[in-house]
Structures are given as C-alpha cells and as structure tokens.
Amino acid sequence: MEGSNKYLGKEKVSKLLLKFSIPCILSLLISSLYNIVDQIFIGNSELGYLGNAATSIVFPITIISVAFAWAIGDGSAAYLSLCQGRKDTKNAHIAIGNGILINFIISILFCILGFLFMNNLLFLFGASEVTLPIAQDYFRIILIFTPVYMMANGMNAIIRADGSPGFSCGSTLIGAITNIILDPIFIFVFKWGIGGAAWATVIGQCLSLIVSIIYFTKTKTFKLEWSSLKVNFGIFSNVIKLGVSTFITQMSIVIISLVCNIMLAKCGAQSKYGADIPIAVIGICMKVFTIVINIAVGIILGAQPILGYNYGAKSYDRVKKTFKLALISTVIVGFLSMLLFELCPSIIIKMFGTESELYMEFAIKTFRIFLFFIVFTCTIKISSIFFQAVGNPVKSSIVSLTRDIVLFVPLVIILPKYMGVEGALYAAPIADLIGIIITVILLVLFFSKLEKEEVASSEKVKILDSKDGLIITISGMHGSRGKYIGEQVAKKLGIPYYYKELTAIAAEESGLDKEFISKLNQKSNILHDLYLTTTPAKYAIEAQEKVIKKIAEKGSCVIVGRAADYILRNYKNVIRIFIYAPEEYRIHSVMEMYGDSECDAKKNIHKSDKNRASYYKLISNNTFGNVNNYDVCIDSSIGVEKTTQIICEFIKNKK
C-alpha cells in the first residue's frame, strides 16, 4: 500500500467524506438522467401517461442488459485493479479484451432474443392492448442499439479502474446532455412521439460509446491488442466471479419491477384506475425513488475507502465516526424526501405531465404510500454497502436481499389479494419497516463486537539488513510444517526469517492492524473469494506486497507464505520452494501442534488449504501448489531435519 493512503486514518473524517462522496453522487445522478428525462418529456407530450406506461414497461427489460454489462464491466475493472496491484500487465489486457468481446456477444444475443420474443416480454412486464403498440415503437429502437448501450456501460467501469473517473463521468454526462437536448426537439418539433424519445436516448448512448472508444486508444495501465480478444475462460471466470454481486443487485431490480408491474396491471384492471394508470405512475415513482437512493448510495460509496482502511487498521472509532456521518447525511436526505412526497407530491407528479383527476388521485396515493418509509430504504441500502466495505459480504447480502426479494416480492403478490391495487403500494413501506429492524439488529451486533478503544500498536519489528544472496520463498500445505522448516533453513544459512515478522512490518508500514493482516488468508466463510475483493482486504494485500518487496531488496532471507514466490517473480535471485505431505502426516502434525482431534484436524486442513488456494489465485491468477510455479517441491514427511538439509544443499549448489 502506498504511504499516501495513511491519510485515510488521519485526515478529518468529514473532510474525507466530502471529498470522496460528492464525485460519487454526481456520477450516479448523471446516470439517473437517462432514466427520468424521457418520462418528463413524454408525459408532457400528446402521449401522456400512456407513453410513460410504455417506457415503464420497457425499462426493467433494459435493466437485464445492464445487469450483464455492469457485471462484466465491474468484474473486468476489479480484475484490472488486482493486476495493477501485482504489476501484471500480461493478464490485464486479456481480461479487458475478453470482457469487451463477451459483452458484445451477449448484447447481440439479447438483441436477437428481444426481437423474437418482443410481444411476450412486453406483455410479461405489464403491457396492455392499449400500451403495446407504443411500447413496441420505443423498444424496437432501444433494442437495435442494445450493443451500443451495453458496450458503453461496460467500458465506463474499466475507465474508472484505469484511473480516470473524471473521464468516465464526462462520457456519461455527454450522453445525458445530448438526450436532454434532443428529447424536446424530436418529440415536440419533429413530432416523432415516443420514437423521438428513443432516438434521443440512443444517440446520447452512441456519443458516450464514441468517447469511451477514444479513451481506449490511450489507456494508462493496459493496452489492448488483437490477442486480447482471444477467449481465456480461466481469466474470464475470475472476471465473472468479481462481477457477480453487481449482477445479483441489478437482477433484483428486474424481479421487483416484473412482479410489481404484473400485480399492478392485474389488480389495476379490476379497479377504477384501469391497468395503464398504475403502470405509468409506478414507473415515474420508481425513477424519482432512484434519484433519492442514488444520493444515499453516493454518500456511502464515498465512505468506502475510509471505512475499509480504518477497519483494517482497527481504528474502530474512525469507522464509527465515518458510518455515523454517512448515516446522518443519508437520514437527512431520506427525511427531506419523505416530507416532499407526503406534503406536496403533486409538484413532482406534474413535472411528468398533467392527466385526469383519476390519474392524479392514484399518483398522489402512490407517492405517499409507496415512498412513506424512504428514509428506511436509504438506510438499508447504505448499510448493505457498509457491510461490504468492512469485509462482511454475507451481512451485506442479507440486508440487501431481505428487503428487496425476501420481503417486498412476496408482499406485492399477497397484499393485492386482500387490499386490491393499493395492496401493491403498501408492500414497500411494510418491507422497509421489517427490513430496517433486521438491518438495525445486524448493525448493533456488528458494532457491539468492535473493541471500544483502538488497539494499541504492537511492538515494532524492523526489516533486517542482510548479505547479498538468494531469497528463499516457502509455500506449503497446512500441516506440512513449512513454517518450521523455513525457520530452520534460515538458521542454518544465517539469514533473516520472515513469517509473523512480515505481517508486523506490514502493519507498521501501512497503519493496518497486525492481527487483521495475519488472518487475511485464514478467513473462513461461504463468500471467502468475495471477501478478498472487499476494500479492507485489498488494503491488506497491497501492504503485504509492498513489504515483501522491501524485504527482498535488503538481501538474502527466507520468506514464508503470502504468495511471496509470485510477488517476487521478476527477481532473478529467488528460489521458490513448495512443501507438501500426505494427508495422514499432515493430520498428525496438526494434532501435535494445535491439540486438535483427528476429525477437527482433517477439517482444518481442508479449510486452510482451500483458503490458501483462494488467496494465491487472487494474487497470482495461478494454481496453488502447481509444480511449474516452483523450483523445488519436497515431501516433508521424510522428516523436518532431512527436508531442511535437502533444501540447504540445493541452495548451496545454486550459489
């Protein structure tokens, strides 16, 4: 980790949050313009609420394409960040090229399937006989340009990861401004109706894509080649793994919209409002809702690096301060929004066109009921991202999916059976109320586990000067006694030994906590791979890599674990050793060293080996224990002394 990151643990929290959150908020608000500008102009055209109903039907279908584009884009961006950290220029461009190619292929398939099943999809998402032809006119144009839309969205995340967030934001802004300018021209001057809104949208997207393509000719940390487009399933599987959380989040929006539209259309048709008014209104309501949520999400995304660093440093007081400030800011935004929606919803509704009294009646009712607990919704959303920032992806998923999928979806199906079309509206506040209770419980449990005071700094350990010579890295299976063998080798050769010492130095250099770094590849949870991509884990990985290189520059030594063999791959004077042993031998070793029962020893061996493999894969994109990655692989069951002797003889012959 670069020393400049230490300011995350020292600078005033409010100043840091302001610095990081404002760009995030602006970026998210700009992206929201695409979703809301069309509906404002369409609602004020001769199409009225029927036009808005049509765009509301198409919107969740386009989110499916966004789910794929963002998942691939975010996964490629995360993989690029990992490659940057390990100075891996070989695989970075392959991951990006594969991401772009497969994103394009998926977009073509999406386009073809969209045309083949257009009517089925539109009816599924709530189209009526009245709105179907309008939705078709809009959807046809959007579908044709789906590859443009998906490519632009996928590239944006990569541009941000390449160190150009301003350029990424500018690309989106150009498209949004173009859309705003062309909408009134195409709709009111050229009289193109809903087709005009679609053309304004896709032209804006084309400009965004052109700007992104221009950027890809002068990237900072990677360079695309024709070979980048050769599919590498090993690398791309990692890209998908890193982007899966984004995909789940976006698809949850699709599920919510689908179920909500189906129930509103079904129950609306049996009410005085008809099927089309509820669909049109909920579309407007969701777009306004998204703007408020994006402000809250922007606040907590800005807080992510602050939270991640200070959690890793066990500066729990700063973690609490940061979350408290983000929470207060979010509650203010949510509360003011709630007052606006409850006291004067008509002001917002009329921005999207004035319709019949029946339309206004349902619209006012929708805003007041559906968004009644929006302050709770905002809190749930930021809490989910907070848990991700502090390395708790399981809690993050629970908070997010409980409100949206576990609660809202069943409620929106059940309540209309007893309350009519209004029942679908009450599903949101009830889900928010139950969801916030669960969220608060998880937050209280989390903060109760944090130490009341920051951990005192551990005893300082220095990097020792050493004689010129070979650097020996030792990796091994759990229970193969690699740590002890490494220590014996260092003693016999008279050179420094680094194992626990490495994490202590990394803690001193980075400001992170020693125990936190030490247990990085010992975490055991069902989302271990996802945990390794969280903010605090990334900081710890960067800190270790930097220290390992510093140690190597001081001269001959023995370094145990931490993927040192890969981190020092470009050093010519490195001997890479892998220690293995039969499972039976390792079980007895663990029983002897830690006092485990035979059953527990076996479980711990399998768990530890799996976590070491995950960590090594993340750092190097190579397989842990692959003989091709090492100079010497040795079975330690021949005995610690003999193993040590063989290694020392090998090293002496190498000098």
Image: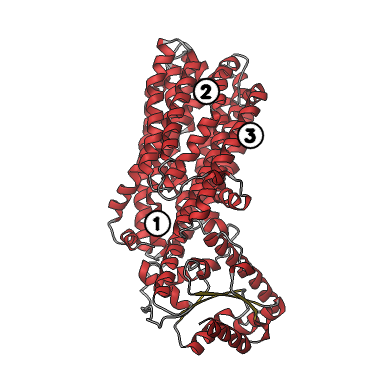
Q: What amino acid is at disc 3?
A: Ile
| Residue for point 29% across, 61% down | 10
* Colour logic: secondary structure
Q: Where residue 613 appears, x then y in whole percent?
A: 60, 65
Q: Is residue 632 left or right of residue 357?
A: right
| Residue denoted by label 3 | 414
Residue at point 28%, 51% (across, down) = 15
- Residue 440 vertical placement versus 154 (above, below): below
Crowd tier of the residue under label 1, counting other residues whose Cα lies within 10 Å: few below 14, some 14–19, many 20 or above: many
Mark closer to the observer (1, 3): 1
Q: Is residue 387 above or below residue 136?
A: below
**Disc 1 to disc 3, C-alpha distance:** 39 Å
Cβ atoms at labels 2 and 1 below 8 Å apart: no
Image point 51% across, 26% down: which residue?
282
- The residue closer to the viewer here, 647 or 199, is 647
Q: Which residue is more in the foreground, 2 or 306? A: 2
How far separated are the C-alphas under marks 2 and 3?
26 Å
Crowd tier of the residue under label 2, counting other residues whose Cα lies within 10 Å: few below 14, some 14–19, many 20 or above: many
| Residue matched to label 1 | 307
Q: Find disc 2 in the rendering and name its residue.
A: 55
| Residue 504 in view of the camera | yes
Estimate the x, y position of residue 239 in percent, counting from the top left. 56, 49
Q: How crowded is mark 3: few (under 14 residues within 10 Å), some or many (20 or more)?
A: some
Q: Position of residue 102 (x, y in %)?
A: 59, 40
Residue nearest the observer in this picture, 243 or 413: 243
What is the spatial separation of the Cα atoms under label 2 and label 1, in whole angstroms?
Answer: 38 Å
- Closer mark to the observer between disc 2 and disc 3: 2
Q: Earlier in the sequence, mark 2 or mark 3?
A: 2
Amino acid type shown at disc 1: Leu
Q: Mark 2 falls on what kind of element?
A: helix
